[in-house]
Amino acid sequence: MTESSQYLSPEERARYARQLGPGVLTESQQLRLKHSTVLVTRVGGMGGPAAQMLAMAGVGRVIIAHGGELIEPDLNRQVLGSEAGLGQRRAPAFGDYLRSLNRFIEVEALDYEPNDEQALALAEECDLLVSCAPTFGERLRLGRASVATGTPLIDAAQWGMSGTLYASDPARHPCLACLYPHEPPFEEYFPVVGAISSAIGSLAALEGIKILSGAGVVMWGRMLAYDGFLCRITQLDAHFPASRCDVCRRSRQK
């Protein structure tokens, strides 16, 4: 670490002035964000707002992963896209947009969804994994990488007007496979309202900022469920399964 990286520059202090102070971040906590690396996959309805807020907050290195081209149905929720970008590859375009938001950070855009080997390699580089993938297969894959590397995980999910959020430090809390031991069937074109996507994605970013900076109280080992249709918020404590988990190898007995 160079001497200059141990402090915020006057320009950085000016940039982050509204989030420095009592009840938010100290300068040392802002520095922790500056020296942190986070992976967000994918960066659509939830991951887009999550990556945007993490970038604007000053996380030093933001890695985004999302394959494919932007299509018309994406635009009810994918805030990093626009009509001008239809037909373009999502990751490069979204990466350029995130870079335009904050000159003090690095953005790496991966034009694919990581497989098991790639997820493991990325997790080893990161201080935090943020899963905003639509499929249980991708979510559980990132969960396995979290356990294998000891990297904290935030898992965000959505359907219709509802969403869930879960935060796990794999050394202390149930992993994602403890919660979902069997991969449920996947409905490719499920309904979703963009407002819930942004709400859950922004909450994921807030938990990420707290985890990386050391500020506030993190919802470790708890799931937040928000039913936007009925306007109900529920928090549930996660528990290890009765029988040993195939991924983290833990159970209620151990």
Image: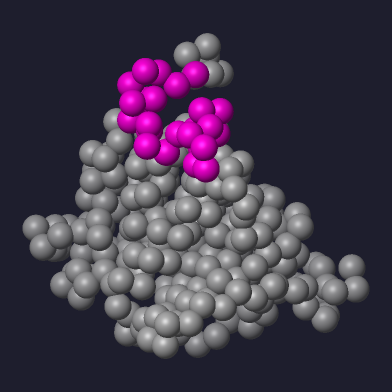
Quadrant of the image for the N terminus?
top right
Q: Nearer the viewer, residue 206 or 243?
A: 206
Q: Nearer the viewer, residue 149 or 121?
A: 149
The image shows residue 220 at horizontal and vertical percentages of 66, 60
The image shows residue 5 at horizontal and vertical percentages of 49, 19
Q: How many marks?
A: 0
Q: Nearer the viewer, residue 37 or 213?
A: 213
- Asked if one can make out residue 138 in the rendered structure from this viewpoint, the answer is no
Specify the color scheme.
one colour
Q: Is residue 191 magenta?
A: no
Q: Residue at x 34, y 65 (%)?
A: 198
Residue at the far left in the pictured view: 84
Q: Is residue 11 magenta?
A: yes
The image shows residue 107 at horizontal and vertical percentages of 36, 40
- Asked if one can make out residue 173 in the rendered structure from this viewpoint, the answer is yes
The image shows residue 175 at horizontal and vertical percentages of 68, 66
Quadrant of the image for the C terminus?
bottom right
Q: Is residue 7 left or right of residue 167?
A: left
Q: Nearer the viewer, residue 177 or 198?
A: 198
Q: Residue at x 41, y 46 (%)?
A: 54
Q: Residue 29 lies in what quarter of the image?
A: top right
Residue at the far right in the pictured view: 253
Q: Which residues are magenta?
A: 7-30
Q: Is residue 192 left or right of residue 234?
A: left
Q: Residue at x 53, y 65 (%)?
A: 155
Q: Is residue 220 left or right of residue 10?
A: right
Q: Residue 44 lies in what quarter of the image?
A: bottom left
